[in-house]
Image: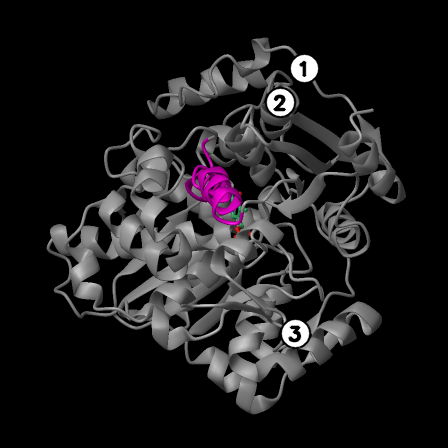
Amino acid sequence: MLQYRSTRHANESCSPSMAILNGLAPDGGLYVPEDLEVLRLDYREVLKEDYLGMARIIFAKFFPDLAEEIPAIVEASYRGRFRSEAVTPLVPADGKWILELFHGPTCAFKDVALSALPNLMAAAVRKNHFEDEILILTATSGDTGSAALHGFSDVPGTRIVVFYPDEGISLTQRLQMTTERGRNTAACAIRGDFDDAQRGVKEIFRTMPHPAKGIALSSANSINIGRLVPQVVYYFAAYRQLMDAGRIAVGDPVTFVVPTGNFGDIMAGWFARAMGLPVEKLVCASNSNEVLADFLATGRYDRKRILHKTNSPSMDILVSSNLERLLYFVCGEEQTRRYMEELGEKGAYEVSSAELESIRACFVGGAASDEEGAKAIHDIFSSDHYLMDTHTAVAWAVSEKLEERGILSEAPQVILSTASPYKFTRSVLAALGEEVSEEDRRNMERLEEVSGVAMPEPLAGIFDREVMHRDVIDPPAMKEYVKAQAEGR
Ligand SMILES: *Cc1c(COP(=O)(O)O)cnc(C)c1O
């Protein structure tokens, strides 16, 4: 049976369901499947299925000890929960393809994983006769928070605490979190940025795995393997839709362009490729926080720089946690541990040229500024009447830049669209050359008028909901905050 192990130590291994429950390995590493060969499958068989069928096969591959429960988990997670029959529909726009991942309950791609994670966790609890209550601890740059709060809201046996940066997220994102009504939920702002929140959360995991008697911590961030695996499915779903559209025949290569922050979404694409899907290149698109683009160009990962607040805030990240999983598969656990220590102590590390070459066999990096993203939103709306959000626009702009430099092949390009344009209304309206009001309700209505694209149902009415969560704290107070939540104070 497939086991999971830590990216930093060979002997920290556990079952798939325990990897989901633990979230982070005890040594601070991330869980990875011990043997990639076990994951390989005949991708042609997967492509014969609909979305739910693909999810059943892929979940069972990664989580064999939950195999019996997986059909029910997939059913509960996806049937009727997305506003599209296809779950993640693929639409053509201006010569490329857009994979719309935002038709879930909170209108961001995080819903694809966070619809499934509570069900996976509940199954893992049963499997392991786990008696502790689970406290989900999550740092968010905006979208994970609302998707996780929604996913875990009033799920028996769980509580959830979300930390988000007090500044640098959109008002809609904030309201989606602070108006969450579940009695087991807490959303708390941090006077700091996402990296502060993520560092604080990792520190709490390391030093306080049981914040109170009978309470065990787990994570809904993409450091949790249960978060990553559901994202593998839509790479297959996109491929199948390109076949259905007559754009490719089975076996043809496809390039995916992924707006990247914590490297989770794109890492799921790497797993899809490792399973056998014909993925040509994974384009890692960054906004003006170009850490990953620089890393892919030079082999040096350097977080010692200023974090820019951009209008694609969910990608405003300097420490992309999931890159550690890729490093593990390329460099092995000893090097990975060393690199992570260097990152912690010196703020930077550099991989060898052979390691970089091996990474670049699959990954291409690029970055686009707010202005370049805004131009993409404007241009594609003008030419094709397709409305993108600011994160998707970064990916679009990067794809254009790489094409101009002749870097990408002729393979069809799928741009992963990670959020509804209505989550970032101000920036999208500004990009279209429209006046932006101080009042976001007005902005949403205006965007609807201008674009003719209907406001997604979950965002309509957000301004009328009661704010339930008002806490704002400094990063050093996070630990005490979690303790208080765990003790029910
Ligand atoms: C989280 C997020 C991203 C980045 O995804 P990662 O898995 O962290 O790389 C991109 N766009 C949006 C809208 C997001 O919410």
Confirm or deny contact between disc 1 and disc 3 (CB under 8 A). Answer: no
Amino acid under label 1? Val
Colouring style:
one colour
Residue 84 percent coordinates (x, y): 28, 32
Which numbered disc flags the more N-terminal residue, 2 or 3? 3
Q: What's the mark number on residue 467?
A: 1
Q: What's the mark number on residue 8?
A: 3
Give the residue drawn at x 18%, y 57%: 47
Q: Residues within 10 Å of mark 3 (few under 14, many from 20)?
A: many
Q: Which residue is mark 2?
A: 175
Q: Is residue 466 left or right of residue 366?
A: right
Q: Residues within 10 Å of mark 1 (few under 14, many from 20)?
A: some
Give the residue drawn at x 19%, y 46%: 50
Confirm or deny contact between disc 2 and disc 1 (CB under 8 A). Answer: yes
Residue 335 percent coordinates (x, y): 66, 83
Which numbered disc flags the more N-terminal residue, 1 or 3? 3
Magenta-span inclusion, residue 257: no
Decide which of 90, 328 is in the foreground and name it.
328
Q: CA distance from mark 2 to mark 3?
A: 38 Å
